[in-house]
Image (tube, helix red, strand yellow):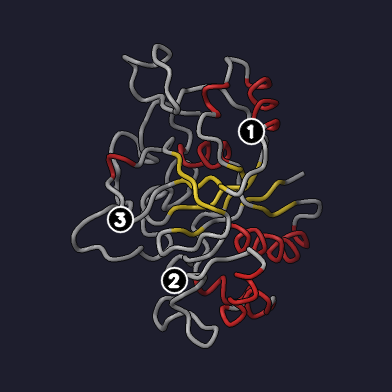
């Protein structure tokens, strides 16, 4: 996990993206980011998360002013059903995962639907590759990166799949992860994956949560599979969405 695509500096320099070993257990990850259509089903079934309840969500710290700001009458904009849902807080994304589990567990008893950890997200984004900067290898591929003609995300699934069959793992919208953000966490790491697991578990919970993957208005040179970012848990922007993960027995 971390910056591993520059062999001349690998293991020789100390930085906040220091490459270090981690271990992840078996899990599932959604092929694409959650779409407006999918999130609509959630708010229709869990009305406290409707945009019309924005004032209450804001007063309780669960979402900011921009929560689903482009939705009208609790509906996504016409023609945007296949776009990734954006302007959702970390809390809203976590609530969606909890709701989704009710149906998912029927087909996979004992499973838990949730946001992916940062380590899981990076493992998944790499698609089985090591020492490569992008999900598709040395080049960015067809991910939606910054260009003058791009004014928003592409439809979910616009990119080619990586080695695990996952799409849009770079450059469409940033994605929430489960973890609290610790900017110097990698500097505390060791060469032992189990030690690193315990170190990560000991980090305090904060209001800043990890975001990964970058968005349509970021330059591709800045968006590597190991690039990290953070936002307050109530933050809602047009560049930020999510995809669920599942722990399976």
Q: Which residue is mark 1?
A: 24
Image side of residue 188 versus residue 60, left or right: left
Q: Position of residue 99 (x, y in %)?
A: 70, 66
Q: How many marks?
A: 3
What element does badge 3 sit on?
A: loop
Few, some or many C-alpha atoms within 10 Å of disc 3 (few <14, some 14-19, many ≥20)? Answer: some
User: Label 3 vs label 2: CA separation?
Assistant: 19 Å
Do callouts 3 and 1 mark residues in contact (Cβ within 8 Å)? Answer: no
Q: Residue at x 54, y 42 (%)?
A: 121
Per the image, the residue denoted by label 3 is 217
Q: Disc 3 vs disc 2: which is toward the camera?
A: 3
Q: Quadrant of the C terminus?
A: top right
Check disc 2 and report its element: helix, strand or loop. Answer: loop
Tag of residue 121: none
Comes first in the chain, label 3 or label 1: 1
Give the residue displayed 44% in from the left and 28% down from the top.
17
* Element assignment for label 1: loop
* Residue sitting at the far right: 110
Residue 48, position as x, y percentages in the image: 68, 76
Q: Upstream in the sequence, badge 3 or badge 2? A: 2
Give the class, few, some or many, for how many residues have Cα within 10 Å of label 2's Cα (few <14, many ≥20). some
Tell me what residue is drawn at x 60 percent, y 60 percent: 93
Q: Is residue 113 above or below residue 140?
A: below
Residue in view at x 68 percent, y 64 percent: 100
Residue 171 at x, y percent in the picture: 36, 51
Q: Which residue extends farthest left?
A: 148
Q: CA distance from mark 1 to mark 2?
A: 30 Å
Mark 1 or mark 2: whose residue is earlier in sequence: 1
Reading the image, the residue beneath label 2 is: 82
- Judging depth in this view, the residue of 110 and 196 nearest the camera is 196
């Amino acid at each position: 996990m971390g910056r591993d695509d520059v062999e001349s500096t690998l293991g020789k320099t100390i930085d906040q993206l220091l490459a270090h070993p981690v271990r992840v257990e078996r899990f599932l990850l959604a092929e694409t980011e959650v779409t407006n259509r999918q999130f609509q089903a959630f708010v229709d079934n869990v009305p406290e998360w409707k945009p019309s309840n924005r004032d209450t969500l804001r007063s309780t710290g669960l979402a900011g002013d921009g929560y689903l700001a482009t939705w009208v009458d609790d509906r996504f904009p016409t023609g945007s059903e296949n776009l990734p849902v954006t302007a959702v807080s970390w809390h809203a994304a976590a609530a969606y995962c909890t709701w989704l589990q009710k149906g998912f567990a029927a087909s996979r008893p004992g499973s838990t639907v949730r946001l992916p950890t940062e380590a899981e997200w990076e493992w998944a984004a790499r698609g089985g590759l090591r020492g490569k900067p992008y999900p598709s290898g040395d080049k960015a591929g067809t991910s939606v990166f910054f260009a003058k003609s791009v004014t928003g995300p592409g439809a979910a699934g616009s990119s080619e799949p990586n080695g695990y069959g996952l799409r849009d793992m770079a450059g469409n919208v940033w994605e929430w992860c489960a973890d609290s953000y610790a900017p110097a966490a990698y500097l505390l790491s060791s060469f032992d994956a189990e030690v690193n697991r315990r170190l990560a578990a000991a980090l305090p919970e904060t209001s800043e949560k990890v975001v990964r993957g970058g968005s349509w208005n970021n330059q591709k040179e800045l968006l590597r599979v190991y690039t990290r970012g953070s936002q307050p848990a109530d933050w809602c922007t047009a560049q930020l969405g999510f995809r669920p993960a599942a722990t399976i027995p």
